[in-house]
Amino acid sequence: QQGYSYHIRDEFFELINDKYLMSSKENGNYRPHFYAVQDKKNPDLYWMIPISSQAEKYKRIIERKEKKYGKCNTIVIGKFAGKENAFLIQNAFPIIEKYLDHVHTIQGQPITVHKELNKTLVKNLQDVLAMYDSGVKLLFTEVKKIRHIMEQELQL
């Protein structure tokens, strides 16, 4: 469901084996979690945007990109669970529901993203994907390969 963040099953990372996917576990913890945005063309696909707590690190990267290109739509800083986080559109990838492990919760409550932040994330993701489709490589992950694998699984 869009508006929530999820942890992803290990099977997805084993199947895809993309060095640019952010690892599902770190030191035994479920990290990172990923914000889900439903695909416009295929409602069975979701785009997963990694969420990083290292907002300060990514603010510096955004500044460099804005100086160089005049804007940065591949990283968004926004509040999540009461803290500033970086939403890494540059590391987004498509997935199907069977690989979602569980919704991210704090004290048993699912954490949602504010409507304005959701709008920004959806718009930036759509812009980045449109640029990717026209040959501008703004995404680190092998989007075409991952999408193909996910669409094949949907056929089964």
Image (tube, rainbow, N blue to C red):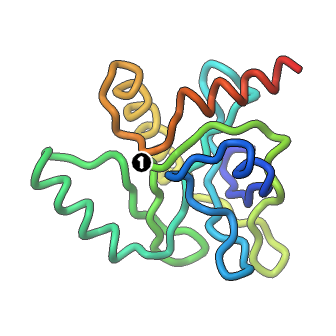
- The picture places residue 156, in percent across and down from the top left corner, at 89, 20
Q: Quadrant of residue 97?
A: top right
Residue at figure coordinates x 65%, y 24% from the top left: 148
Q: Quadrant of residue 31?
A: bottom right
**Residue at coordinates 53% horizontally, 52% vertically from top-left?**
19
Instruction: Please tell me how many numbered marks the rendered image carries.
Output: 1
Callout 1: 10 Å neighbours few (<14), some, many (20+)?
A: many
Q: Nearer the viewer, residue 128 or 28?
A: 28
Q: What residue is shown with label 1?
A: 90
Residue 41 quadrant: top right
In the depicted structure, whether residue 56 falls above or below residue 46:
below
Q: Is residue 150 left or right of residue 137?
A: right
Q: Nearer the viewer, residue 126 or 114?
A: 126
7 displayed left or right of 77: right
Percent across and percent down for residue 67 are 10, 55
User: Most extreme residue toward the right, as rendered?
Assistant: 156
- Image quarter (top left, top right, bottom left or bottom right) of the N terminus: top right
Q: Residue at x 66, y 60 (%)?
A: 112
Q: In the rendered view, tell whether residue 134 sits above or below residue 113.
A: above
Residue located 83% across and 56% down the image: 101
Q: Position of residue 142 (x, y in %)?
A: 51, 36
Whether residue 15 is situated above or below residue 64 in the rendered picture: above
Q: Is residue 128 placed above or below 28 in the rendered structure? A: above
Residue 49 position in % (x across, y down)? 55, 50
Left or right: residue 101 versus residue 29 is right
Callout 1, which amino acid?
Answer: Gln
Q: Judging from the image, what secondary structure is the residue with disc 1 in?
A: helix
